[in-house]
Image (cartoon, helix red, strand yellow):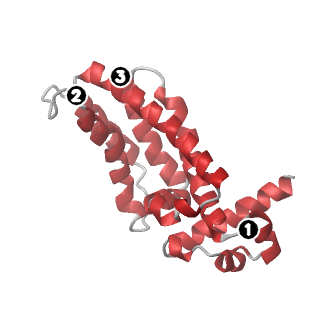
Amino acid sequence: MPRLVHDTSAILDAATRLLSAGSADAITIAGVIREAAVSSGSVYHRFPNRAALLAAVWNRAVQSFHDELYPLFDGEPVAAAVALGRRTVSWCRDHPADARVLLAGLASFEPAAWPAERRDARQADQERWDRQIRGLVTGLRTATGRATAEILLIVVDLPYAAVRRYLGADRPIPAALEDIVERAIRSALTDTGRVGQRP
């Protein structure tokens, strides 16, 4: 069983390398066989078609990211928002290939063609993630008086934008970026000169 897990990870790693060199269009069964240097049977045994492969690539990246961040939603809302921003940066630095999967966007992975169980798994995790975000937004609205749109801009969009400029250009994420993102989030949430008013 460990060998099966290892081989599956190697196949998905090969798929993410293909994406990093181009786009999601570059992820094909034939391309993965060449990149991973494995037999066609090894790939088809796990992923009977390209749709199943694309689903596995996307779901693995999202699950890795979310699993890192789920524990950080607890606690005081501003502190949680800061922790989430910092961890977004560090996760992207530690997992640049998976981060580029997320940067490509779900639509690039053709989810309508996925096997039903893969779509269901994605939907279940997305619903959990959305609940966590809604809970954080509610807490931040109470704690800061800011509007939902402003909170989402600060807590969600800001960290993504901070890493996107480096991932998109295939440049290393600077070591100081966590601190920069933390200061930006904390300042934006605690500055008394609010931009947005609730609601």
Q: Quadrant of the C terminus?
A: top left
In this view, the residue farthest toward the right is 1
Q: Residue at x 43, y 50 (%)?
A: 175
Cα separation, mark 1 vs mark 2, equals 48 Å
Q: Which residue is mark 3?
A: 139
Query: What amino acid does circle 2 point to?
Result: Arg
- Give the foreground label among 3 and 1: 1
Relative horizontal placement of residue 9, taking residue 132 as reference (left or right)? right
Q: Earlier in the sequence, mark 3 or mark 2?
A: 3
Query: What amino acid does circle 3 point to?
Result: Gly
Q: Residue at x 72, y 64 (%)?
A: 10
Q: Residue at x 51, y 42 (%)?
A: 126
Give the SS element for disc 1.
loop
Residue 146 — which label?
2
Image quarter for residue 84?
top left
Give the SS element for disc 3.
helix
Q: Which residue is mark 1?
A: 48
Q: Earlier in the sequence, mark 1 or mark 2?
A: 1
Q: How many marks?
A: 3
Q: Residue at x 53, y 70 (%)?
A: 19
* Dots 3, 2 in contact, CB < 8 A: no
Image quarter for residue 51?
bottom right
x%, y% of residue 108?
47, 65
x%, y% of residue 112?
53, 60
